[in-house]
Image (spheres, rainbow, N blue to C red):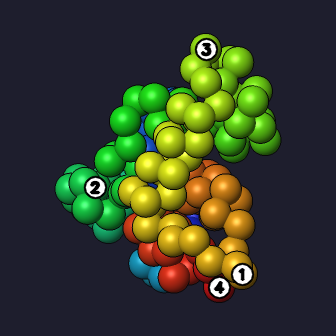
Amino acid sequence: MLLSQHVEVGVATQLLAAAPQHLGYLLKDRVTDPADFAGSLRRVAGGGTVLDPQVVSGLLADPGEADPLRSLSPRERSVLELVAEGRSNKAIGERLVISQGAVQKHVSAIFNKLDLPAGEDDDRRILAVLAYVCPELRGRPERLTR
């Protein structure tokens, strides 16, 4: 049973994909009746799934606009995954059997698609990785650069 302050669609998606049985995801401020909560716990313990209606709405919402990672090509996703593993452009090129120049072009495209403009104060590789691993930051570059 996961109790959260807000809907984290990425977390909910991962949990449902991994094991939809024995899963509960409720919002803390909406759990007001102890008897209802106890019933939810029993359903989850019995192998059922309990999702707050706001979680369901978040899962069903069109993520196209909210998730800029959807705009990445499969190759750009592969490059970003390797960046998230801490790989250098050289290592990424060797792993994907592409030139370092091609890696740099993919990295630049990732920065553009994630709306991470060049600046002296920010490391765009780290910001791109944060967008990759923190679904709540996707599509919100202003939260990434604070």
Give the x, y percent position of residue 14: 50, 41
Give the x, y percent position of residue 89: 71, 36
Label 4 belongs to which residue? Answer: 146
| Mark number, residue 69 | none
* Structural distance between the alpha carbons of marks 3 and 2: 32 Å
**Amino acid type at mark 2:** Pro
* Structural distance between the alpha carbons of marks 3 and 1: 32 Å
Q: Nearer the viewer, mark 3 or mark 2?
A: 3
Q: Nearer the viewer, mark 2 or mark 4?
A: 4
Q: Nearer the viewer, mark 4 or mark 1?
A: 1
| Mark with earlier residue (2, 4) | 2
Q: Nearer the viewer, residue 120 or 78?
A: 120
Q: Are marks 3 and 1 in contact (CB under 8 Å)?
A: no
| Mark with earlier residue (4, 1) | 1
The residue positioned 64% from the left and 63% from the top of the image is 124
Residue 120 falls in image quadrant: bottom right
* Structural distance between the alpha carbons of marks 4 and 1: 10 Å
| Mark number, residue 121 | 1
* Structural distance between the alpha carbons of marks 4 and 3: 36 Å
Which SS class for mark 4? Answer: loop
Check disc 1: other Cα within 10 Å, few if <14, some if 14-19, many if 20+: few
**Amino acid type at mark 1:** Asp
* Up/down of 3 relative to 33, above or below: above
Extreme residue in the top direction: 97
Q: Nearer the viewer, residue 15 or 92?
A: 92
**Amino acid type at mark 4:** Arg
Give the x, y percent position of residue 30: 42, 78
Label 3 belongs to which residue? Answer: 97
Which SS class for mark 3? Answer: loop
